[in-house]
Amino acid sequence: MKIPVIRQLFQNTTPAQLETTLEVLEAFCEFRGVSEHEVDVAGEMITNICGALEVHQMVKDGAVEKDALNAFGQKVMGSIDR
């Protein structure tokens, strides 16, 4: 998870575009010929896309972009600490 990447995705793509990309990456990971490294890279991209989608939702619900990004980062870091 990289907050600058999530910010860039949030600012430059719509939720619909992110959803479509997410579907493609998830399908890609299911192919038999995909290496572990490729799955890891796709997984990182999936994480960032899901973060951008969550930030889009928080902003839609009234949060300021900066606060939404910080809240998402704290949420992820809190789940890692458990």
Image: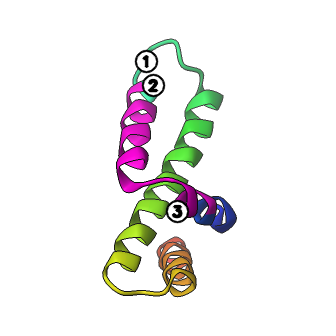
Residue 76 position in % (x across, y down): 51, 72
Along the polypeptide, which appears first: circle 3 or circle 2?
3
Instruction: Tell me which amino acid carries mark 3.
Output: Phe
Residue occupying image coordinates x 53% and y 71%: 80
Instruction: Specify the segment rendered in magenta.
Output: 8-27
Seen in the picture, residue 76 relative to 61 is either above or below; the reply is above
Taking the image as shown, residue 44 lies to the left or right of residue 60, namely right
Q: Nearer the viewer, mark 1 or mark 2?
A: 2
Residue 8 position in % (x across, y down): 63, 60
Residue occupying image coordinates x 48% and y 81%: 68
The reply to whether the C-beta atoms of the residues labelled 1 and 2 are less than 8 Å apart is yes
Badge 2 density bin: few <14, some 14–19, many ≥20, Cα 10 Å = some
Q: Which secondary structure dominates the residues rendered in magenta? A: helix
Local secondary structure at mark 1: loop
Badge 1 density bin: few <14, some 14–19, many ≥20, Cα 10 Å = few
Q: Quadrant of residue 66?
A: bottom right
Instruction: Tell me which amino acid carries mark 2.
Output: Phe
Q: Circle 1 sits on which residue?
A: 31
Q: Circle 3 sits on which residue?
A: 10
Q: Nearer the viewer, mark 3 or mark 2?
A: 3
Seen in the picture, residue 12 relative to 77 is either above or below; the reply is above
Q: Circle 2 sits on which residue?
A: 28
Q: Residue furthest top?
A: 33
Residue occupying image coordinates x 60% and y 38%: 40
Along the polypeptide, which appears first: circle 3 or circle 1?
3
**In the rendered view of the protein, which quadrant contains the N terminus?**
bottom right
Whether the magenta-drawn stretch holds residue 20 is answered as yes
Whether the magenta-drawn stretch holds residue 55 is answered as no
Local secondary structure at mark 3: helix
